[in-house]
Image (tube, grey):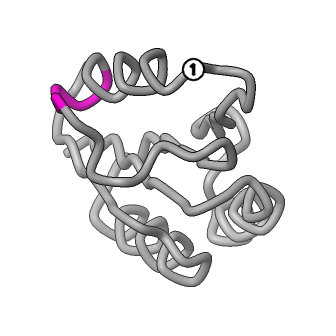
Amino acid sequence: MNYTVVGLFPNKEFANEISEDLEKSGIKNEDYIIYKTNKDSSKEQKRNFWKKLLGLNTPQVQTGAERLITSVACKNAEELANIKQSFEKNQVVKIYEFQDMT
């Protein structure tokens, strides 16, 4: 089964650690994306982003200038567990898991 895992992190300083941990666990660079919030975006732009991404009217995580989102594609339950472990090690705020999004 294929999964897409999205992790929300408190700030951008975790980007390098998340990347390193994912690659150490066997996730290829082309299988994940790290999105950094643009500090110049207005609160309304950030709200619209969360609404488009997750269908939320209001973000569950405060929309600060330093938020970080990571999206990872994985192919099996073992990779899924490794990704979640990497996320939790790096103070993930929320994990979203989607199955078979192809």
Relative height, residue 80 to residue 69 (above, below) = below
Q: Position of residue 41 (x, y in %)?
A: 63, 20
Image quarter in which the N terminus is found: top left
Q: Is residue 67 left or right of residue 78?
A: right
Tell me the kind of residue under disc 1.
Ser
Q: Position of residue 65 (x, y in %)?
A: 66, 42
Q: Nearer the viewer, residue 83 or 16?
A: 16
Farthest residue, direction bottom: 89
Q: Quadrant of residue 48?
A: top left
x 54%, y 60%: residue:
9
At mark 1, the secondary structure is loop
Q: Position of residue 68 (x, y in %)?
A: 60, 47
Q: Position of residue 93 (x, y in %)?
A: 41, 67
Magenta segment, principal secondary structure?
Answer: loop
59 part of magenta stretch: no
Q: Is residue 10 left or right of residue 97?
A: right
The part of the chain drawn in magenta is: 53-57
Question: How many marks are shown on the rendered structure?
Answer: 1
Q: Nearer the viewer, residue 68 or 40?
A: 40
x 29%, y 17%: residue:
52
Q: Is residue 13 left or right of residue 5?
A: right
Relative height, residue 48 to residue 99 (above, below) = above
x 27%, y 51%: residue:
60
Relative height, residue 83 to residue 61 (above, below) = below
54 part of magenta stretch: yes
Residue indicated by mark 1 = 42
Q: Nearer the viewer, residue 74 or 65?
A: 65
x 32%, y 60%: residue:
95
Image quarter in which the C terminus is found: top left
User: Quick one: label 1, few (<14), some, or many (20+) residues within 10 Å?
Assistant: few
Relative height, residue 18 to residue 74 (above, below) = below
